[in-house]
Amino acid sequence: MTTVPETTQHPAATGSVEQRDICLERVHKRYGDHVVIGDLSLDIEQGKFYALLGPSGCGKTTTLRMIGGFELPTSGRVLLAGDDVTQLPPHKREVNTVFQSYALFPHLTVEKNVAFGLERRGVDKHETKKRAKEMLELVQLGHLAKRKPGQLSGGQAQRVALARALVNRPRALLLDEPLGALDLRLRRQLQDELKRIQRDIGITFVHVTHDQEEAMSMADTIAVMNKGAIEQAGSAEDLYERPESPFVANFLGTSNLIPVTVEQGGADEFSTVRTSDGHALRLLRNRMWNLKGEQPVAIGVRPEKVRLWGADQTPPEHDNVLPAKVLQATFLGVSLQYALKTAGGQELTVIEPNLVGNSKGTFGPGQDVQVSWDARQTFVVEGETAGA
């Protein structure tokens, strides 16, 4: 691993982890009558890798641009390290941005591209050369210092853009889909590189992406955005294992969502819910904390947590169990994927690991089966599930 020179460490790296680097307070953004961001508040702790995740048009890039000063909020405040910077232009904020296009100067060498910002600020030539060299070593491109951008691969150009943004030692680095133009193999390689660099240099990264796997592999905290608002924020594990809305449940991976009614009472650690055709299912009582009782309720389970049994078999005693019929069985190499319909008409997906090498699967279309899963793996969401 590259050793980071002491001079590249930002003060944020040694401060309290509870200190907020970036804060948005009730931010709104409208273009005429069109509301892009509505009443958005968020806090980003210093030294964290924070991802804004969501589909196109959800407001994540607009949010990033307001943090960077490229867009001004219609109302609300933007604070960096506690200072109100809402009306400040980008060059007066302690943040730098890496865009998808990279925007390297084609006539300058890699070294000169990285040093450009320091030279514009009038930093001493010796210090400029020293810091540019340190940044190129950090992104593992020191050996390409004398090349021109046209001689670089896409991944190398991305790392030069990253070094150029970091050489100014910003308080935070903003990344607007920086890997979007790269092929899948290179994108995955650079995901690891970005996380390593963020960890080594110790400053706050805010990363906009629509790629769920990218966000999960890199970010300490993921904020899932939908229609200009944050639906849920937390670690990848929190969002995957305990989604709080149908949108989050199906945007971060795939979920089986089953509309239910909640039954009152019960003395143990589980609550009971009932499907439309009367089947009782259980989930941990502490999973019910977010229900407000004002919207439809559904329970959910991830496809890989469900197991199939023959109609004459006996699933584990404490599992949730539903009768179903196989609609389709698909061999995917490492796994077998089943599409099913329950007796109540609910369509489910089941993914089982390929343990026996049976390309036709254990169960075939039209076969009656039972689906079961550990009741502790059940989560609950509130809101309409259709189109989630």
Image (cartoon, rainbow, N blue to C red):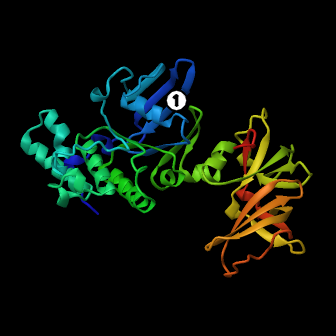
Q: x, y percentage for residue 239?
A: 60, 49
Position of 191 relative to 51 (above/below): below
| Rendered position, 377 above or below 231 | below
Left or right placement of residue 29 versus residue 151 in this view: right
Residue 371 position by quadrant: bottom right
For this rendering, which residue is in front, 302 or 109? Answer: 109
Q: Label 1 amino acid?
A: Ser
Question: Closest to the observer: 51 or 283?
Answer: 51
Q: Is residue 286 left or right of residue 106?
A: right
Read off the residue under disc 1: 41
- Are there few (<14), some (14-19), or many (20+) residues within 10 Å of tag 1? some
Residue closer to the observer: 305 or 37:
37
119 shown above or below 376: above
Residue sitting at x 42%, y 22%: 72
Q: x and y percent of residue 118 in the render?
A: 17, 38
In the picture, the quarter occupied by the C terminus is: top right
Q: Residue 71 in the image: x percent, y percent?
A: 41, 26
Residue 127 picture quarter: top left
Looking at the picture, tell me which residue is in the foreground, 164 or 266: 164
Quadrant location of the N terminus?
bottom left
